[in-house]
Amino acid sequence: MDLDSLPLGRQADYPRHYDASLLHPIPRALGRRELGIGGEALPFAGLDRWFGYELSWLDARGKPVVATLTLEAPATTPHLVESKSLKLYLNSLNATRFDDAEAVRACIAADLSHVAGGEVVVRFGVPAAIDADGAIPIDSLDIAIDDYGPPNPAHLRCSDDLVEETLASQLLKSNCPVTGQPDWASVRIAYRGPRIDRAGLLRYLVSFRDHCEFHEQCVERIFVDVMAHCRPGTLSVEARYTRRGGLDINPWRATPGTRPPAAARDLRQ
């Protein structure tokens, strides 16, 4: 796919009418090929959870309605949806009349499922922002860092001690592969297995700082690298990216059989 053909980073007219053709798919295989992931058998389970804060439409009498929404697309869909195209699509509902809120939800679900190539779950509302969730923060480690990219899994090390813990960092940053603009996120790594060296993990996460890749692809890269270098028995990687254009993206990947984390969002979102 020619990334220059995407609406991201290009001037776009404000949509005046409902238009499902505004949605642009991106093949997930593009990022997975570089990670050595191919075919239908994925090494992880996962989903992409989106929170939307700028949704509006007209009721049957023409009165505007506003709402928030949560979208969940399974990682098994052949395509992810390009973020600016989703923003434009949602904006195209602003001047469209619907009989009721369920008609809006069903319309969005059908359009996104068609573009993604699999069922996308759509619900109204977003979870409350939380200050802490029990994960162990590693950002206060007193270490020197001078590696800002490309992502360097050589930093990942582990000991022989077996543990079960969740580590968290607010320092994940990558860049949009189309515009070069920064994408900011927190990340939670829950695992059971050899103890991961926290300083090495933090250096590894910071090495994404100048890296250009879509959110979902970054999370899959983290999962694959941690599995290869630390070999945990179970692993869950969730990134919570800050809002852009009224949307935030929260990809999650984990060893098969792991239950998805409850929907949650950070204060920065």
Image (cartoon, rainbow, N blue to C red):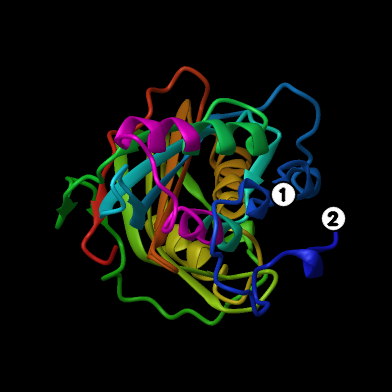
At 80% across and 32% down in the image, what residue appears? 38
Q: Which quadrant: the N terminus?
A: bottom right
Q: Compared with residue 115, is residue 30 higher up or lower down, i.e. above or below?
A: below
Of residues 261 and 55, the one nearer the viewer is 55
Dot 1 or dot 2: first in sequence order is 2
Q: What residue type is labelled 2?
A: Met
At 26% across and 54% down in the image, what residue appears? 63
Check whether the beta carbons of the residues at disc 1 and disc 2 lie within 8 A of each other: yes
At 63% across and 40% down in the image, what residue appears? 228
For this view, does 72 lie left or right of residue 5?
A: left
Distance between the alpha carbons at the discs numbered 1 and 2: 8 Å
Mark 2: give few (<14), some (14-19) or many (20+) Cα within 10 Å: few
- Is residue 92 highlighted in magenta? yes
Of residues 108 and 171, the one nearer the viewer is 108
Residue 56 in picture, x, y percent from top left: 34, 55
Q: Which amino acid does label 1 sit on?
A: Ile
Of residues 143 and 211, the one nearer the viewer is 211
Residue 3 in picture, x, y percent from top left: 78, 64
Q: Compared with residue 269, is residue 28 higher up or lower down, i.e. above or below?
A: above
The answer to whether residue 161 is seen in the rendering is: no
Q: Which quadrant: the C terminus?
A: bottom left
Q: Which residues make up the magenta segment?
A: 87-107
Circle on res. 26:
1
Q: Compared with residue 122, is residue 84 higher up or lower down, i.e. above or below?
A: below
The answer to whether residue 35 is seen in the rendering is: yes
Tell me the SS state at disc 2. Answer: loop
Tell me the SS state at disc 1. Answer: strand
Residue 187 in picture, x, y percent from top left: 39, 54
Circle on res. 1:
2
For this view, does 93 lie left or right of residue 169?
A: right
Q: Compared with residue 189, is residue 247 higher up or lower down, i.e. above or below?
A: below
